[in-house]
């Protein structure tokens, strides 16, 4: 299934794509796509619906973030060897874990706002993992059975805030609009191998990131298992699994976002995003 949210900001409704690619209104069954509504049990119940009985949304308009909210927004850093190299850092022995503030969620086509004081706002295409079943101390072999689905993420970063102002990376990762997710929440049954997906990002029409998730240092199964050794993952949690090389920080000379820049972000099979960078008011 491909689930989505459509409508003006703050008034989004839940939708589902039918076999013809039309949006059907699912809001009568799923008022809010978040938390227990994306549990494996809830998704199984949706599979029994007759989509033809749901109203067609002729003009869905704006597409919102594919989840209304998330309990936790976990991220994995330096998970592609080339990206670690361009960052001047060693390949990690264990997954590098950090958070984004959940208030950074935004729609896949919404403007990205360059925050006040920003000098180095940067882009990062990533595969997103959505948890559908509580996970605590799970093995790698069992880890994917806790995954509800996947989505495209642009893990926006402000490098000055992240690196040069001490403390945790979360400061450079959490500005409003720094977490575009979607357009679709694609259920796990449509992604037979999360390590065989192409991730790409175009900046102003030029491809700057283009890699396969097969090149990830730590696989999705390893990441879910690893996180579950330290915390309980719950339905609706999202994990951003790392970005390949090609970020602005790694370019020579470095290149960071300026107002008017356009990013097009895709995890193939999960949907394509498009954002324009704008200055903060």
Image (cartoon, rainbow, N blue to C red):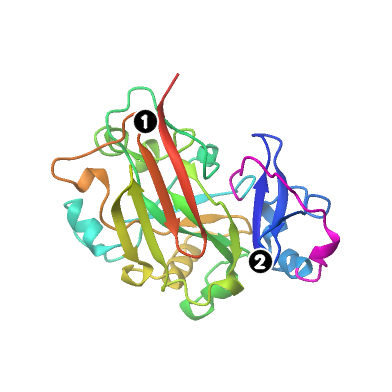
Query: Of all residues shown, which one is farthest toward the left?
Result: 252
Tell me if I can see residue 5 in this picture: yes
Dot 1: what SS? loop
Lower position in the chain sequence, tag 1 or tag 2: 2
Residue at screen point 38% across, 36% down = 171
Residues at circles 1 and 2 in contact by the CB criterion of under 8 Å: no
What is the number of the mark on residue 1? 2
In the image, is residue 198 above or below residue 6?
below
- The residue indicated by pointer 1 is 260
- Name the residue at 66% across, 48% down: 5
On-image quarter of the C terminus: top left
* 20 on left or right of 157: right
> Can you say whether 192 is above or below 178 in the image?
below
Query: Residue lying furthest top in this view?
Result: 281
| Element type at mark 2 | loop
Quarter assignment of residue 29:
bottom right
Q: Position of residue 71 (x, y in %)?
A: 60, 48
Residue range corresponding to the magenta coloring = 47-66
What residue appears at the point 31 percent right and 35 percent down from the top-left corner? Answer: 257
Q: Is residue 173 magenta?
A: no
What is the quadrant of residue 49 in the picture? Answer: bottom right
Residue 61: x and y, percent?
65, 41
């Amino acid at each position: 299934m491909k689930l989505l949210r459509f409508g003006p900001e703050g008034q989004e409704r839940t939708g589902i794509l039918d076999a013809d690619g039309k949006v059907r209104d699912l809001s009568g069954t799923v008022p809010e796509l978040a938390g227990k509504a994306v549990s494996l049990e809830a998704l199984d119940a949706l599979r029994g619906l007759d989509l033809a009985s749901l109203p067609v949304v002729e003009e869905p308009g704006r597409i919102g973030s594919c989840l209304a909210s998330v309990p936790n927004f976990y991220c994995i850093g330096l998970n592609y060897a080339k990206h670690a190299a361009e960052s001047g850092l060693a390949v990690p022995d264990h997954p590098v874990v950090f958070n984004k503030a959940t208030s950074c969620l935004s729609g896949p086509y919404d403007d990205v706002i360059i925050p006040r004081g920003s000098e180095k706002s940067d882009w990062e295409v990533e595969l997103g993992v959505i948890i559908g079943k509580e996970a605590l101390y799970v093995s790698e072999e069992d880890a994917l059975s806790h995954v509800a689905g996947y989505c495209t993420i642009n893990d926006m970063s402000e490098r000055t805030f992240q690196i040069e102002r001490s403390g945790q990376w979360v400061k450079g990762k959490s500005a409003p609009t720094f977490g575009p997710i979607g357009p679709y929440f694609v259920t796990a049954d449509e992604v037979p191998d999360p390590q065989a997906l192409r991730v790409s990002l175009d900046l102003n029409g030029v491809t700057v990131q283009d890699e396969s998730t097969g090149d990830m240092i730590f696989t999705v199964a390893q990441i879910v298992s690893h996180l579950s050794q330290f915390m309980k993952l719950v339905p609706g949690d999202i994990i951003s699994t790392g970005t390949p090389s090609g970020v602005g920080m790694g370019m020579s000379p470095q290149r960071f976002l300026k107002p008017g820049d356009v990013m097009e972000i895709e995890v193939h099979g999960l949907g394509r995003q498009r954002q324009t960078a704008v200055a903060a008011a």
